[in-house]
């Protein structure tokens, strides 16, 4: 399934719409701009919260928790030593963690699980700078992958601001 993440230009925070291939909004992202933890709330089109992304306050490297309801479903962390650019791990329950590889901060990367590409993220599909596509193979947890890509956005914004 291909999704499009389109950031809102003239709003505070990290507000975005996530649409499907036909242009229908499937999730809305509300960035809590005054939040100490750097929080994003994903809601369905009816306004019901479906997931939350929050930065861990105490961690050596950028780390974000993804939760659905009261349950943590993934943790996105920057790898400690990566000689060829930044890499992030998406730690999910069980043995099949995911890895983000490529040019992460330019939104040109893949997400792999057990050596197989499960998602591709690219700005090349769009001319607008605050819009990028996420193409996810079937059978994956789309919500966790989309929330992980948004966590990467939070990490990029914090790094560019020197926090």
Image: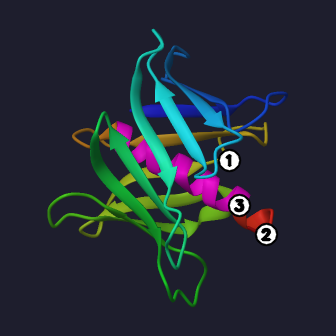
**Magenta residues, start to end:** 143-157
- For the N terminus, the image quarter is top left
Q: Name which of mark 2 and mark 1 comes first in the sequence.
A: 1
Nearer to us of marks 3 and 1 is 3
CA neighbours of label 2 inside 10 A, class few (<14), some (14 to 19), many (20+) = few
State how the image is colored.
Answer: rainbow
Residue contact between numbered discs 3 and 1, judged by CB atoms under 8 Å: no
Count neighbours of disc 3 (C-alpha within 10 A) and say few if under 14, some if 14 to 19, many if 20 or more. Answer: few
Do the numbered discs 3 and 2 sit on residues whose CB atoms are within 8 Å? no
Residue 129, horizontal then vertical, whole percent: 78, 43
Task: Say which residue label 2 marks.
Answer: 162
In which image quadrant can residue 6 be found?
top right
Instruction: Locate residue 79 relative to residue 13 in the image: left or right.
Output: left
Residue at (50, 42) in percent of width and height: 134
Front in this rendered view, residue 38 or 131: 38
For the stretch drawn in magenta, the main secondary structure is helix
Between residues 66 and 4, which one lies in front from this camera angle?
A: 66
> Residue at 21% of width from left, 40% of height from top?
139
SS class of the residue under badge 1?
loop
**Which one is nearer the viewer's eye here, 11 or 86?**
11
For residue 158, the mark is 3
| Numbered mark located on residue 97 in the image | none
């Amino acid at each position: 399934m291909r999704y499009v993440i389109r950031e809102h230009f003239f709003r505070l925070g990290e507000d975005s719409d996530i649409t499907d291939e036909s242009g229908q909004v499937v999730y809305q992202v509300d960035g809590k701009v005054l939040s100490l933890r750097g929080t994003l709330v994903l809601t369905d089109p009816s306004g019901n919260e479906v997931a939350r992304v929050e930065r861990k306050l105490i961690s050596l490297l950028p780390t974000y928790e993804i939760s659905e309801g009261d349950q943590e479903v993934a943790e996105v962390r920057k790898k400690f030593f990566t000689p060829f650019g930044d890499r992030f791990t998406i730690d999910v329950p069980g043995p099949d963690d995911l890895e983000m590889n490529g040019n992460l901060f330019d939104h040109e990367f893949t997400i792999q699980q057990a050596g197989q590409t499960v998602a591709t993220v690219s700005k090349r599909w769009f001319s607008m700078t605050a819009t990028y596509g996420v193409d996810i193979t079937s059978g994956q947890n789309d919500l966790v992958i989309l929330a992980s890509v948004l966590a990467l956005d939070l990490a990029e914004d914090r790094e560019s601001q020197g926090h």
